Image (cartoon, rainbow, N blue to C red):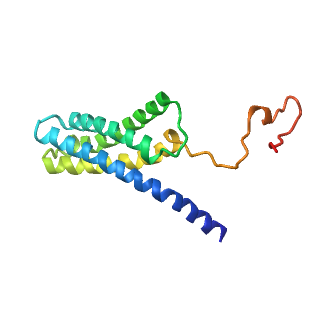
Amino acid sequence: VRLITSIIARVRHLVPELAKFGVVGATGAVVDLGGSALLYGTFHFGPLKAKAIALTAACVVTYLGSRFWTFRHRENQALWRELGLFVFLNGVGLLIAEAVIAITAYAVGSRDQVAYNLASVIGTGLGTIFRFWAYRKWVFLAPLVPNEPVVTAQHAPTLAAGRSFQPPP
């Protein structure tokens, strides 16, 4: 019973965050997928260049939405560190999407608009799964739990002095 209660509590906490991530992600997907389709189909950019430009624009949209809405309740890191991690992880997501597009366009040889859009959607989907996991793990950290003792340097265990750890009162 305790295991089931624990799982339900975790899922219940995750659902609102996942829903917000979905809204921000959908907005980013419109910028990404619409932009890349427009750049590739109308302006005749190469398949990888079109995706890179569109995903970069979507990265700006999703960072702002994630930082100030989806994950606003989580611990904030130094802005430049958080932004750097966000950009790096979006780069990994871009590589995932680019790999799917490259396989479709260059390995399979299918370069028509429908094949490009399908590869773009699949690549974006795989990249989104990675980004949701990575943002929660490394960028937008879990919130501090209220009423939980905080261990500071003065309360940390000191093996050299032979003292054991005693939690603060």
**Horizontal side of residue 72 vs 47, given as left or right:** right
Q: Position of residue 140 (x, y in %)?
A: 50, 41
Quarter of the image with the N terminus is bottom right
Depth order, front residue of 155/107: 155
Depth order, front residue of 73/49: 73
Residue at position x 14%, y 47% from top? Answer: 113
Above or below, comparing residue 92 to residue 112 in the picture:
above
**Horizontal side of residue 34 vs 83, given as left or right:** left
Q: How many numbered marks are there?
A: 0
Quarter of the image with the C terminus is top right
Kindly indicate the quadrant of the structure image that contains residue 141: top right
Q: Where is residue 11 in the image (x, y as percent from the top left)?
A: 52, 61
Residue at position x 82%, y 40% from top? Answer: 165
Above or below, comparing residue 98 to residue 18 in the picture:
above
**Horizontal side of residue 101 vs 155, given as left or right:** left
Above or below, comparing residue 151 to residue 19 in the picture:
above
Residue at position x 15%, y 41% from top? Answer: 38
* Viewer can see residue 105: no
Residue at position x 47%, y 45% from top? Answer: 71
**Horizontal side of residue 103 vs 79, given as left or right:** left
* Viewer can see residue 92: yes
Depth order, front residue of 55/107: 55
Q: Residue furthest right?
A: 162
Depth order, front residue of 103/55: 55
